[in-house]
Amino acid sequence: RKCFEIIKKTFQGNYVMFGAFKIYNDTAFLDATNTLLSLLRYISFDDLNAYSKLKYNVYKFLELLHRNHMSDVFMDLSEYIPLALSLARNGLEADNTEIMMQSAQIVDHFCTFVYQRTKKESKETTQILNFITNYPAILPEIMYVIMHIVLFEDGKSFWVYVKPLFSLILINPQAFSDCKQQLL
């Protein structure tokens, strides 16, 4: 828990100029992030739910990582994206509003990054297309979960889901059509 809390506070407090790591070819940031993401592989979702402080720190870490360092994640740590999106998908259905919001923001930051980067040719574009090809069900499943929550559940903060849903629709309009057919 403390590892995630330390990195979360480092990301959140803007104490470190992460761009300097790239300028000096320093891998400390990527190594630390890689280590934390490796730890996540060994924490089951049930265990994560059992420890609320750990869960909060993990989701906040992932949200900040996706908000501020998506390019680094895609280029150097792309093997962790399915894990992060899977955690976000599960967090969307959480009872805790803060976890729901962070999960929705993870999805939105990811989808916004994908949408912006696929408009132009770059090495990132190739990585993104490879990811979407290798994991075709992740984003449509997240879209289905969000639409199901918005359409059929009571008492949730629906406004939390608007932005990630719009981002998902922009990335994959066909999945949106399929989802509408399934739900209606």
Image (cartoon, grey):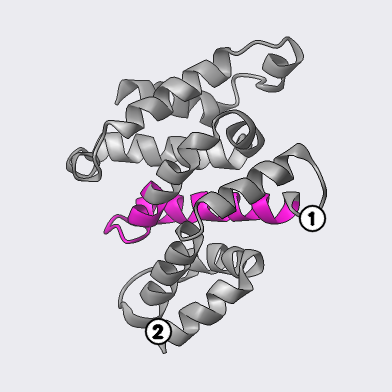
Q: Amino acid at mark 1?
A: Lys
Residue shown at the point (61%, 63%) measured from the top left: 167
Secondary structure beneath disc 2?
A: helix
Residue shown at the point (62%, 73%) measured from the top left: 173
- Label 2, on which residue? 183
- Label 1, on which residue? 119
The answer to whether 66 appears left or right of 117 in the picture is left
Q: x, y (%) of residue 131? A: 57, 47
In this view of the protein, which residue sits in the foreground, 148 or 174? 174
Residue shown at the point (60%, 70%) measured from the top left: 169
Main SS, magenta residues: helix
Residue shown at the point (25%, 44%) measured from the top left: 45
Quadrant of the rendered image containing residue 1 = top left
Q: x, y (%) of residue 114? A: 66, 52
Q: Find the distance from the CA under tag 1 to the CA under tag 2.
A: 30 Å
Decide whether residue 112 is among the magenta residues.
yes
Q: Amino acid at mark 2?
A: Leu
